[in-house]
Amino acid sequence: MLKMTNIDIWIRHRQIINAVSFDVQPGAIVGLIGPNGAGKTTIMKTILGLIPFSGAVTIDNQSVTETNHAGLKSVGALIEHPALYPFLTGYQNLALYTQDEANLQAIVTQLEMTPYINRKAKGYSLGMKQKLGIALALLNHPQLVILDEPMNGLDIDATILVRQIIQQYAQQGTAFLVASHILSELEKVVTDVIIINNGQVRLNQPIATFNQVTAQRYRLQTTDMVQTQALLTDQQIPFEQDAGYLNIAQAALYMVQTLCFNQQIQFKALIPEQVSFEQRIVQLLHEKDGDEHAN
């Protein structure tokens, strides 16, 4: 479906995107995650041919460039904020982009927009505008849908509804690339996770693999906490101090045990704990930043 290969972007002599490569397969819901300024929106604009770049973007084996948008016929998108005509009704905004009345009506019904679809968009709340923007992205049976912060302005009911609609479309084969800072919602819907920071892909995994590898952490207390911290720092093993304990990742546990054993440091307490999706993302970003600074 979507394939990005070695994408580089320079703006004013500064590299914004560095060697980004990933695929989005039919039916996948890929979460694009990263801090503000990481490059998420830039990547989405690149896919839509809105920014000059080097490398290759293909959609259904059709090349997309800044001057060639033929491959975008099967793509729907909501980037940053909905592009609406305020003095047209919601229905009229949608009708500008499709002649398929049945498809338009079906999306209006799915998104529960019927009560206000014939009102002018200038009077819409933020949530109404957001749903109209999502509706625009879903028009014309797209094979790939790109959504940048789709939950912005939505109340709880609308958030659940949009999540369900994304899953329904994905089950029918539509691919999604979704960026959101609401990680708890993203976790509930994505099939794959791409973490980006400083313009580079730091991790690209199925959500099941990500959860399995990073879900477990341990709270550690030893007979010599000062020396233990020094050992971890020297070996560049990430840890956090918390109320007399050191928090370490499951993946680092064997190395920590070995280091302490060699220095005749004993474990006084080793307490397993589950870590939230958000905490795992933050932890991973910090670890990757540490690796980069160390190099």
Image (tube, grey):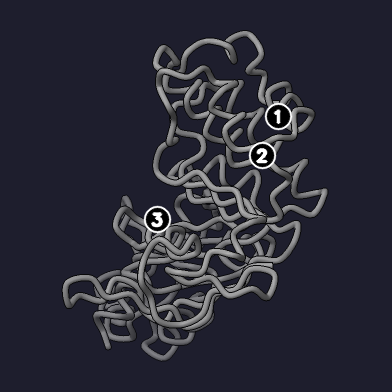
Q: Amino acid at mark 3?
A: Thr
Residue 139 - label: 2
Q: Identify the residue at image location x=65%, y=46%.
A: 189
Up/down of 74 relative to 19, above or below: above
Q: Which mark lies nearer to you, 2 or 3?
A: 2
Residue 104 - label: 1
Q: Amino acid at mark 1?
A: Leu
Residue 169, image x and y in percent? Answer: 75, 44
Farthest residue to the right: give it.
Answer: 172
| Residue marked by disc 3 | 41
Farthest residue to the left: give it.
Answer: 12
Q: Of helix, strand and loop, which one carries label 3?
A: helix
Q: Quadrant of the C terminus?
A: bottom left
Label 2 vs label 1: CA separation?
7 Å
Whether residue 192 is visible to the viewer of this picture, yes or no, is yes
Q: Of helix, strand and loop, which one carries label 1?
A: helix
Label 3 vs label 1: CA separation?
27 Å
Up/down of 279 relative to 14, above or below: above
Q: Residues within 10 Å of mark 3 (few under 14, many from 20)?
A: some
Label 2 vs label 3: CA separation?
21 Å
Where is residue 208, by image quadrant?
Answer: bottom right
Q: Amino acid at mark 2?
A: Leu
- Observer-nearest of 207 and 74: 74
Residue 153 - label: none
Q: Identify the residue at image location x=46%, y=57%.
A: 33
Q: Identify the residue at image location x=64%, y=66%.
A: 24
Q: Of helix, strand and loop, which one carries label 2?
A: loop
Could you tell me if the residues under marks 2 and 1 are in contact, i.e. CB atoms within 8 Å? yes
